[in-house]
Image (cartoon, rainbow, N blue to C red):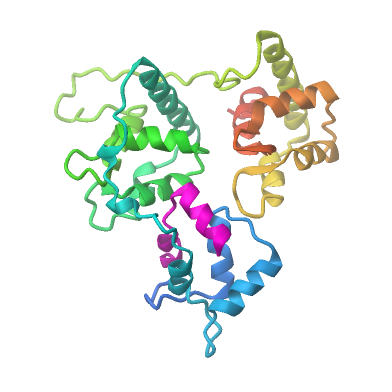
Amino acid sequence: CDRFRAYLQRTRLDAKSFFQDWDWHNSFKVTPKQFRQVLASLNFEFSEEEFDILVKAYKTPEMGDIRYLKFLEHTKPSFFLIEEEKLEKRPPPKGKQYQIDLNKLLTKIKNVVLGSRIRMIEFFQDHDPLRKGFLPPSKFRGALDNMKLMLRAEDLDILEREFVSKVDHTKIDYAQFCDEVDSIFTKKGLEKDPKAASVAFKKENLLDPDDVLNPAEEEKVIDTLRRIGMLVKKYRLLLKPLFQDKDRTNSGFVTDTRFRAILDFHKIPLSEEQYQLLRKRFIYKDHKNEINYLDFDNVLKAYSGDN
């Protein structure tokens, strides 16, 4: 319970809404299998022993279902009251660096949305049945987490500051955020002014958006990706499902050793230098031993002819 409480405090996710998706009769209970699935969808790692302890502690004596509401009451962080937190109390966004970070973040999100054709509005509306266009920060973060955008805590803070509602400062204006991202597809209000020109969004080179590689390393990574892309095309390999098979929590990450083992098993051997450069580029910043295989697969498409 203490680990889960700390996890919710750190990620600011609204766990209750995840359980309610399975609670069709509003009984505040789910089956043990559904309970496990929710914890996995939240990317919360737990051992079999820990799971068995939770099941014994919160199951009902009659049907054996899990009383998730009681579990959430016991794991609610002591000061996790984001809905009551005034976003305007945070330091106001200002400065040239903030604008640079915001533009870079929005470009990153637009690239992901353009590549995977995500309908962002639908993820947010799952938490907004009245379609008001506003959500508390916890539900806003939960929707973004479901999209697998791989955003860091500082990225979420930037978005919450930029798109705080002008009507209710405890809510995020997700409708405005979606309009900004969807501008890559069309210009809003075009039906009222059909002659207005829409600016086409140019997808940036995703090879090294965070500048973690120097020019010489970039050239070597490009050569490595071309070689892997050629083998993927030649043998008609689908690498993404292979990584997903080893990603039990559907987090978008696998350990670096698992990543290399999968490539080796499918006859895509890497030299130590090639592996370390790929690792340097695709390592997940918040977990130093995990590879972002979704990012890797997305970049590799440009070199395998699958883009």
Q: Does the magenta stretch include residue 4?
A: yes
Q: Relative to 119, is 282 above or below?
A: above
- Let me know if residue 160 appears in the view: yes
Residue 202: horizontal and vertical position, in percent? 43, 18
Mark yes or no: residue 22 visible: no
- Count of all numbered marks drawn on residues in the image: 0
Q: In which quadrant of the rendered view does residue 96 lie?
A: top left
Q: In this view, does 80 lie above or below 118?
A: below
Left or right: 181, with 252 as reference point: left
Find the magenta span and give its range.
1-21
Residue at (62, 19) in percent of width and height? 212
Most distant residue in the front direction: 78
Please state, as top left, top right, bottom left or bottom right, where the N terminus lies in the image: bottom right
Q: Position of residue 135 (x, y in %)?
A: 29, 49
Q: Residue at x 52, y 80 (%)?
A: 65
Prevailing secondary structure class for the magenta stretch in the rendered image: helix
